Image (cartoon, coloured by chain):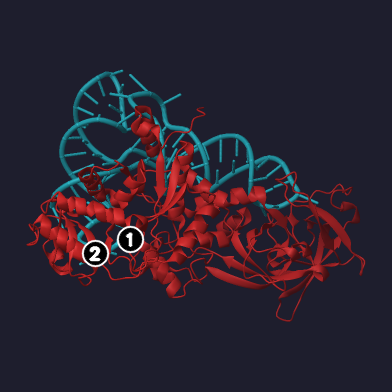
Chain colours: A red, B cyan
Amino acid sequence: MSEEKSLNFLEEIIEDDIKAGTHAGRVHTRFPPEPNGYLHIGHATSICLNFGLAKKYNGKCNLRFDDTNPVTEETEYVESIKADIKWLGFQWDNEFYASDYFEKLYGFAVALIKKGLAYVDDSTAEEIAATKGNLVTPGINSPYRDRTIEENLRLFEEMRAGKYKDGEKTLRAKVDMAQPNLLLRDPLMYRIKHEHHHRTGDAWCIYPMYDFAHGQSDSIEEITHSICTLEFIHHRPLYNWFIEQLGIFPSHQYEFARRNLTFTVMSKRKLLQLVNENHVAGWDDPRMPTISGMRRRGYPPEALRQFSDTIGIAKRENIVDVGLLEFCVREHLNKTSSRVMAVLDPVKLVVTNYPEGTEDVFDIENNPEDPNGGTRKVPFSRELWIEREDFMEEAPKKFFRLAPGNNVRLKGAYIVKCTGCLKDTDGNITEIHCTYLPESKSGNDTSGLTVKGTIHWVSIPHAKTAEVRMYDRLFRVEDPSNEDGNFKDYINPDSMHVLNSVFIEPALANANAGDKVQFMRKGYFCVDRDSTPEKLVFNRTVTLKDAWAKEQRKA
RNA sequence: AGUGCGAUGGUGUAACGGUAGCAUCACAGACUCUGACUCUGUUUGUCUAGGUUCGAAUCCUAGUCGCACUACCA
C-alpha cells in the first residue's frame, strides 16, 4: 500500500518546474472570474484547484476580476464572488482587477503598433466576420491592414479619445489570416464601447478583448501557472504570441476539463433563465448548483472541498455523478451535526398504559459519532407524534416498525408494544395505540427484550411546529443539456415540496439560520434564512441512505 | 471538411514498458437504541485493428467515437 497520493497532471507539471528551477521554483496561480454572475460548483472546483495548488507548493494565489466588458459586469457580483470564495475557506494573496491594467494594456497595444504588429481596422463587425474565412478556408486580409505605423498610432489615440462611435473602428493584431487556428486570424485587441465601467467609470471608451487582457494580466502579476478550462486551449498560441511579441513575463497557460454534474445545468445562460423565468426562487435557491445555493441548501464548505479533491482533475470529458457530491455532504454532516427528532408526516400514537398528565424527560445523546457532542433534554408523554410510514396494519415479515403485536423502541425512551389502531369512516388511520414497558427505560433497561426497530417521536404537548422544504434534484434526467428539445422540458416538477406542519422537539426552538442538524432517520436539514422566531423553516439538505426504501422498491 | 484535445468498471480518477489500483455506486453479510454510520466481502473496466517488445492501458501505425474552435463575450 502506497501512502503517497498520486499526482494529477498539473501537480506533475509544477513539480517538474520546481525541479527544473523554472521561475526559481516559485508557484503563483490565480482565480480569474468575470464579475457578471454568481459562482457555481464548477467555479468551486477551479477555486479549490488554484488555491489548493498554491497552498500545496507554498505559493500564492491571486483573485483577479476579469472585468474587461463593462456591459455585463457589476459590483454586486464582485461582492458575491468574494463572499463565496471566503465561505469555501480560501483567502487570496492579492485582489486585482484587469481594469487596474487598462493604462498598461494601452501601452502594450501602442508597443505592438510600433512594431508593426497591430493596426486599426475600419471594417464593420459583419465585414470582419465575412473576411474571416471558416474552418477549411483561409480568411482574407483587411483593406486597412497595411496602414502606416504613424496612422495607426494616431487613429488608436483618437479611438481612446472618444472620436469614434461604438463599432466604428477596432484595433487588430497583425498575425496571419491563413492560420488554421481561427483565433490567430488577426484577432481583435480593442473595441470601442461608450459604456460606464463598474470601476473605471467613464475614463475609457475602448476596452481590451479577453485575449489582449488575460495573458497580459497574468504576466503583469507574474503568474507562473495560469490554469483554465479546455475550451481556451485554442487561445494558448495567441496567449503566447502576445507575450513573446511584447517580451513580457512568460506566464504559461494550462488547460483542464471543466467538471460537469449530473441532474443539473451549469451554463450561466441557462442558470439565468431558471432565475428569470421563476423556475427557482433566485440565484441562491437551494436547488441551484451555485455556491450560494449550495450554502443555503446546507452543504458544508468542507464537503465541497472534499468533493473537488475526490473527483480529481484531468483533460477528458466528464460528467460527475451528483451522488458523489451528496456522499461528501453526508460524510461531513454525519460527523458534525446533532441528531434531533422531527416528525414530517405525523400520526398520533397513544401510550395507553402511561399515566395521563405525567411526563418523563430523557437525556438523549446529540451525536453518537461525536463523544463530546453532549446530550439534550427531550420530554415524553402519553401522546406522541410518529411518522405515518412507521406503522402498518398488516406488515410484511421484514417490517421492523410498529404493527399490531410488534415491539419497537421509541428512541431514547421506552420499548412499546403495538396494540392496534383507530380509523375514521373512510378507513384512514387516525390514532395508533400501544403499551409501554416501564422497565425498558432507555439507559436503564432491565426488560431483557431486544427489538429490531427503533423509531423517532415527538411528544404532542411539547411539540413545536416548523415548515420544512423538501428539496430534490432540479432535473429529471442526468444531462438535461444533452436531451432533445429544451433543457427546461426536463425540470423535475417535484424538486421542492413544502411541509407546513412538521413537529419538532422543543430543543430546536432556539435554532438559528444556517444551523445544521440531522432529523433522525430522515436526513440532514438546515435552518433557512426565512425562519422567524414564530416559525422555523428548514431546508432538506440531503436524505439519509434508506435501505428499507430500496427493499420496498424491489418488491 | 481543417486544426486541436481526448478515450481505463455505471460515475470520477490512478498506474509514466513489469500484479489494472483508489473513491463512489450496485450487490451480499456483520453490527446497530438511526433500516443511518461503521465493518467484511463480491460483481463490473483498458475504443478497434495491426505492429514493436520477453512483456503494452502505457510506445508506433491506421481507423472509430466524443468534445472544442468560424462573438467588437469571457
Q: Secondary structure at mark 1?
A: loop
Q: Residues within 10 Å of mark 2 (few under 14, many from 20)?
A: some
Q: How many marks?
A: 2
Residue at horizontal 49 percent and vertical 57 percent from the top: A82
Name the amino acid, label 2. Answer: Arg
Question: Is A32 left or right of A242, judged from the image as shown?
Answer: right
Residue at horizontal 74 percent and vertical 48 percent from the top: A373
Q: Is A7 located above or below residue A398 in the figure?
A: above
Screen quadrant of the C terminus of chain A? bottom right
Task: Using the rendered view, name the quadrant where residue A522 is placed.
Answer: bottom right
Q: Secondary structure at mark 2?
A: helix
Name the amino acid, label 1. Answer: Thr
Circles 1 and 2: CB distance less than 8 Å? no
Of residues B12 and A381, which is closer to you in this image? B12
Of residues A158 and B11, which is closer to you in this image? A158
Residue at horizontal 31 percent and vertical 52 percent from the top: A214
Mark 1, residue position: A68
Disc number for residue A160? 2
Please tell me which of labels 1 and 2 falls first in the chain: 1
> Which circle, 1 or 2, is nearer the viewer?
2
Question: Is A524 left or right of A432, judged from the image as shown?
Answer: left
Task: Using the rendered view, name the quadrant where residue B31 is placed.
Answer: top right
Q: CA distance from mark 1 to mark 2?
A: 15 Å
Of residues A171 and A58, which is closer to you in this image? A171
Q: Position of residue A285 (x, y in %)?
A: 52, 67
Q: Is A323 located above or below residue A275 in the figure?
A: above
Q: Position of residue B8 (x, y in %)?
A: 37, 41
Q: Chain of mark 2?
A: A
Q: Residues within 10 Å of mark 1 (few under 14, many from 20)?
A: many
Q: Position of residue B13 (x, y in %)?
A: 41, 41
Res A391 visible: no
